[in-house]
Image (cartoon, rainbow, N blue to C red):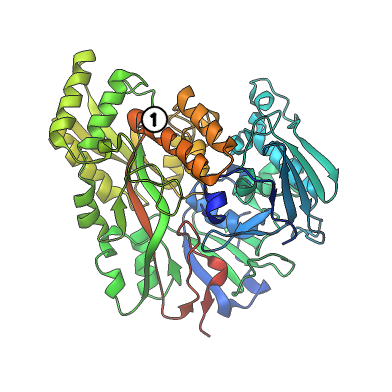
Amino acid sequence: MNTRHVTSLVAAGAAIVMLLSGCGSTGTSNSSNASDSNIISVYGSEPAHPLFPGNTTEAGGGKVVDQLFAGLVTYDAKGGIHNEVADSITSSDNATHYIIKLKSGWKFTDGTPVTAHSFVNAWNYTANSANKQASASFFSTIEGYDDLQKPDVDPKATLSGLTVVDDNTIDVKLSQPDSAFPVKAGSHAYMPLPESAFKDPKKFGQHPVSNGPYKFVSWQHNHSIEMVKNPDYKGNRVAKNDGLNFKIYTSPDSAYADLRGGNLDFTNMIPDTALTSFQSDKSLKAYNEPGGNTLTFTIPEWLEHFGQNEEGNLRRQAISMSIDRKTVAEKIFHGTATPAVDFLAAPISAYSKELKGNEVLKYNPSKAKELWAKANAISPWSGEFGIAYNADGTAKNWVEAICNYIKNTLDIDAKSIPMSTSDEFLSNVDSGKMTSAYRSGWGPDYPSADNYLVQLYDSSSADGKGGNSGNYKNPEFDAMMDKALSAPSTEEADKYYQQGEEILLQDLPAIPLWNQNATAASTSAISGVAFDYGGGPVFTALTKKQ
């Protein structure tokens, strides 16, 4: 997912009075719509879901959706916020009421206009639990959201807090203060959809009609997703190339071999086998910059011995303290990752190295053994501890390394559990079918601690409604997030976010491991490589030497 930022004010989700005034179908390729000479081939992985923005929460689909759609706002490389389809977003009543004005003249790639209905209908569809969209929780602060989460909800039911005033005006009423609302407005969940999306959702998910920098051409499953420059796009991210070909790989090593062989132009997935050499490889251009991605692994609360209780917390803390993050970072990541000190990334204003309880993120084998023994006194340990991961990614080496640390420190059977593809892995995660711990992490959708904390650990994001795949629920944590969203300043909001993190450090619904750099490599013919706020590639900036 892409990350962005709106100065220090938006990074913390601080309350404001006014914001932003004025300012495949499967089949054969059809790249003939643009010159093949400047079509950029880039690394891709098979999306876990059809290409509905509100159901896209993983990198494979996220990179694609982000190029096809345009929302209310965009974010620059430093995290600054800029109006896109929005002309203005104004707030009143302590950030519980927003008026959104849209620019006129925008249209979808099928020629239909982008209006207030395009946004409101999309938001209602995503928020309604009957539609099983993974980003439903992004709308949890809008009036009427709870009604849409009832088991017997009408699939056509809508958010009572949304009103279309006219074709270019949306009235949004919230059930609680949410100063991060305008920041979330640039995330995938808030993208507009044309009428065709609701008439035939199955067809749309395979062949989306969009309004972003690129126009969809084809999706040959497990092979490629192609798109060409959208000539009618009116926003801030005008493509410098003629199109993109996301070549789908099941192994970063295969992609890297294709890159070195001239059969791929760009990859932002450097395999473990190349981390020591890619920056010195004279045949390529290499990139390594600080980013906003986090690496974790999740221990779901439904596993035996790992409930949200004293035993479960003791075991999570013991496992966390049995891992030497610094050594793994040096030996496996080779200068492209740094040990985690909290649940955020360094670019976020609430990020802190001084949180109470962060000693659970430090290597301490003797303390780990002590905590494990205390847990055994409550309920003796039996069985094995496993961490699942997708074998088509780059997790294998680090998952195996931390399993070895856990095994050697706690004297238990700990092992890695590979799953063949991202699609299989994410399907099990999303459906709550995991029977072990599993690798996790976050490339944020918008530049706020809210995105790392509320979307991953708040109760509103559990039960398939958001990124809280481990179903962690703690009312004390939820209350702290509400206070942060109601705070009148960045500084006060950050204090509440940090107090919420201190609760997470006790419960450890996920184990923070490392913050990842933005790493990538391209052929010598490619120029314009740049990264967004969270370390994701800016694909629209890529060009190829003729």
x and y, in percent, of residue 23 in the image: 72, 62
Q: Is residue 133 visible?
A: no
Q: Is residue 49 left or right of residue 346?
A: right
x and y, in percent, of residue 52 in the image: 63, 46
Q: Looking at the image, which residue sits at the far top?
A: 378
Q: Nearer the viewer, residue 440 or 100?
A: 100
Within 10 Å of disc 1 (Cα), the crowding (few <14, some 14-19, many 20+) is some
User: What is the number of callouts on the image?
Assistant: 1
Residue at 19% across, 15% down: 377
Find numbered disc 1 in the image and state the secondary structure of the residue it sits on. Answer: helix
x and y, in percent, of residue 438 in the image: 35, 37
Vertical arrangement, residue 112 with respect to residue 242, above or below: above
Q: Is residue 322 left or right of residue 161?
A: left
- Residue position for label 1: 503
Q: Looking at the image, which residue sits at the far right?
A: 166
Residue at 22% across, 50% down: 326
Vertical arrangement, residue 286 with respect to residue 312, above or below: below
Vertical arrangement, residue 336 with respect to residue 191, above or below: below
x and y, in percent, of residue 531 in the image: 48, 64
Q: Quadrant of residue 99?
A: top right
Q: Is residue 75 visible?
A: yes
Vertical arrangement, residue 334 with respect to residue 158, above or below: below
Q: Is residue 51 left or right of residue 419?
A: right
Q: Nearer the viewer, residue 59 or 495?
A: 495
Residue at 57% across, 77% down: 38
Residue at 39% across, 30% down: 503
User: In the image, what residue type sits under mark 1?
Assistant: Ile
Q: Nearer the viewer, residue 520 or 346?
A: 346
